[in-house]
Each structure stands twice: as C-alpha cells, then as structure tokens.
Image (cartoon, grey):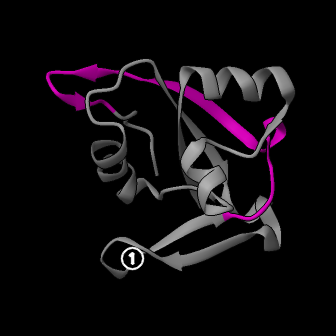
Amino acid sequence: MLIYKIFRAPEWAQLQAESQTRGAPIDLADGYIHFSTAEQASETAAKHFAGETELTLLALEADNLGDALKWEPSRGGALFPHLFRDLKIDDVLWAKSLPFENGTHIFPDDMT
C-alpha cells in the first residue's frame, strides 16, 4: 500500500540535500512524520496546505517502513500512518509536483 507525504519546497530540498529528514515543523512538534493514504491526501492538503503552491507529493510503500510505521487514529477517528524514525530519500518511490489550480491541489491520477 502506498502512503503519501506533502512537502513544501524547502522541506523537499532539505531531504534531497541531506538524504534524510525528521520532517516538516508539524512533524518535529509531534515527534513523528505524518503521512496520508490516497483517500486522505486531498483533505490533508486542504486542511494543512490551503492556498500553498510549490508543493511536492512523495509516495512511499508502507510495508517497506517496518515497525517504525504506526497506524493511529486522527481526524474523525480514521487511522493515519505515522513514521517514528527519520524519513530517508531511499524510502521515496516517487516525487511529483502538486499543482494548485482554481483553489484546489491537483493530485496525480495514478494514486492508489
């Protein structure tokens, strides 16, 4: 199962430059890296990245993250994937631009 992380341009640049990251400011504050499923990603973008441009969507295979990935209840009791270790560039299957058009982030058609 693929899970997804949205990064702002500086956060994505840092991961590329340093090959690992502890995440975005919200991740650092909470002590784990927040991810979303395909079904949760658009709501995450609307809630936490409203109106933001220059975003990158990362896809990772949940099964490759081992025991460091925990599924915990969040919005409305839905289970969200949380990573309790650094995110490594080698964890990323792909990264794609997340365009913002007409007030909405446009997600890739091939998200599963």
**Residue found at x 27% / y 44%:** 46
Tally of numbered discs: 1
Q: Residue furthest left?
A: 102
Mark 1 packing: few (<14 Cα in 10 Å), some, or many (20+)?
A: few
Out of 12 and 97, give the one closest to the viewer.
Answer: 12
**Residue found at x 67% / y 44%:** 23
When the figure is inspected, residue 15 is found, relative to residue 53, above or below; the finding is: below
User: Percent x, y for residue 5?
Assistant: 55, 45
When the figure is inspected, residue 48 is found, relative to residue 1, above or below; the finding is: above
Out of 65 and 87, give the one closest to the viewer.
Answer: 87
**Residue found at x 79% / y 68%:** 68
User: Percent x, y for residue 66?
Assistant: 81, 68
When the figure is inspected, residue 82 is found, relative to residue 38, above or below; the finding is: below
From the viewer's perspective, is 80 left or right of 67? left
Q: Secondary structure at mark 1?
A: loop
The image quadrant that residue 10 belongs to is top right
Out of 77 and 109, give the one closest to the viewer.
Answer: 77
When the figure is inspected, residue 93 is found, relative to residue 38, above or below; the finding is: above
The image quadrant that residue 51 belongs to is top left
User: Percent x, y for residue 44?
Assistant: 36, 51
User: Percent x, y for residue 38?
Assistant: 43, 54
Q: Is residue 3 magenta?
A: no
From the viewer's perspective, is 88 left or right of 71? right
The image quadrant that residue 29 belongs to is bottom right
**Residue found at x 36% / y 35%:** 107
Quickly name the residue at label 1: 78
Q: Tag 1: residue type?
A: Ala
Q: Residue furthest front?
A: 29
- The part of the chain drawn in magenta is 83-106
